[in-house]
Amino acid sequence: MNFVFFVFDGFDALDVVGPYEALVRVPGSRATFAAPERGIVRTENSALNLSVDTAIDEIAGCDLLLVPGGFATRKLERDQRVLAWLRAIDPTTRITASVCTGAMLLAAAGLLRGRRANTHWAVRQRLLDYGAVPVAERVVRDGKYATAAGVSAGIDLGLALAAELAGRRVAEAIQLGLEYDPDPPFDSGDPVRAPAALRLAVLAFLRMREMQCGV
Amino acid sequence: MNFVFFVFDGFDALDVVGPYEALVRVPGSRATFAAPERGIVRTENSALNLSVDTAIDEIAGCDLLLVPGGFATRKLERDQRVLAWLRAIDPTTRITASVCTGAMLLAAAGLLRGRRANTHWAVRQRLLDYGAVPVAERVVRDGKYATAAGVSAGIDLGLALAAELAGRRVAEAIQLGLEYDPDPPFDSGDPVRAPAALRLAVLAFLRMREMQCGV
């Protein structure tokens, strides 16, 4: 099975590394990172850079496509070359997945029209602009589309997909190998349970970062 | 504040990306990835490669040092250049941290002697070989040393350190930004709660991978 992880300048590292860690352990799988161009791909915060050997034009199909998010997705939503590639690769996949604002790229490509989907909580309602149906669940499935909530939700997504592809037993073993028995220090990870003031502060910060990223 | 993330061929991606995602959002911080040599650094499963601009010899000190794990740590435990660098940098830090088998490198460098520490559950007892005291907690603090359990525990570590460095309010905001409200698909992430058969299967797999990695 070929798993393709799409990356681009400004992607969020954990969005892709979370599901990657689960999926790379699926027996018989092969992971490929593909970017608009070969070479160095910078993450959102630019301290962490990937070296990517494969350009998206070299990928004609795959069993699983994973699209991460990051502030740069706001710009990529208008990148016709990337959107055309997503539309071309999607019919070849068994599963098309996204983490965080990666869903906005799938949506902008027209792949989520009329479908239930999720993305980062701060932009969830923007899914409506592309005819998708926003759903506040950690991992949303609609047909072969699997869209996870923000950033860290990609780990839960990756394990769920590992179970689907390789069986529950294998996925449980992967979870144990990753010692994924989370113990968040605070109860602030969900926007509904978080205090309103905290939610507003994070929204303001995210908007500022978006502007810094020129969107 | 300067945060240094040590990486090396064969490191585990999530070990470092988990805490990185939390810590890179600490206001006034600067993250640097440093490897034994500049250039391409390959992760444990080699599909994901980093491009690293800084060699460890260029780093004389930092506020926070984070050491990830991976099968390669078994070899690095005997790498005198790396161990000497860890010993040299440690006195300059405010916090010296590890995720997963990264603790074995801190221990091999002699930094955890007589201290409480944790690492991946599968190798926890090996901490005794270096005079450390194994403790089965998700994040173990002993003085300025913070050692997390396996792989995914780095996210919990990163948020705890963010709170220590920037205050609880900031850490809560980071957790909300990362939408870290985990929902593991299975209850298999803890070796004590996991069925014995699963635990043995994972141990056997890990040993096989260690052998494949030439250790």
Image (cartoon, coloured by chain):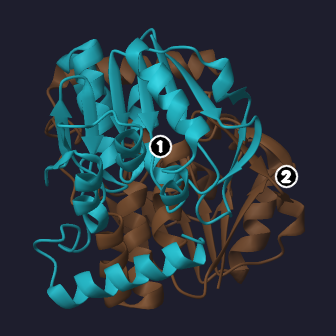
Chain colours: A brown, B cyan
Label 1: which secondary element: helix
Q: Position of residue B182 (x, y in %)?
A: 25, 54
Tell me the distance, in whole angstroms, between the alpha carbons under discs 2 and 1: 32 Å
The quadrant where residue A153 appears: bottom left
Chain to which the residue tagged by mark 1 belongs: B
| Mark 2, residue position | A81
Q: Nearer the viewer, residue A37 or B89?
A: B89
Residue A97 location (% of width, % of height): 54, 66
Question: At 18% across and 33% down in the image, what residue appears?
Answer: B141
Whether A14 is drawn above or below A172: the answer is above
Q: Tell me, yes or no, if residue B26 can be seen here.
A: no
B200 on left or right of A122 = left
Q: Could you tell me the amino acid type at mark 2?
A: Arg
Q: Is residue B79 above or below residue A75?
A: below
**Dot 2: what SS?**
helix
Q: Amino acid at mark 1?
A: Val
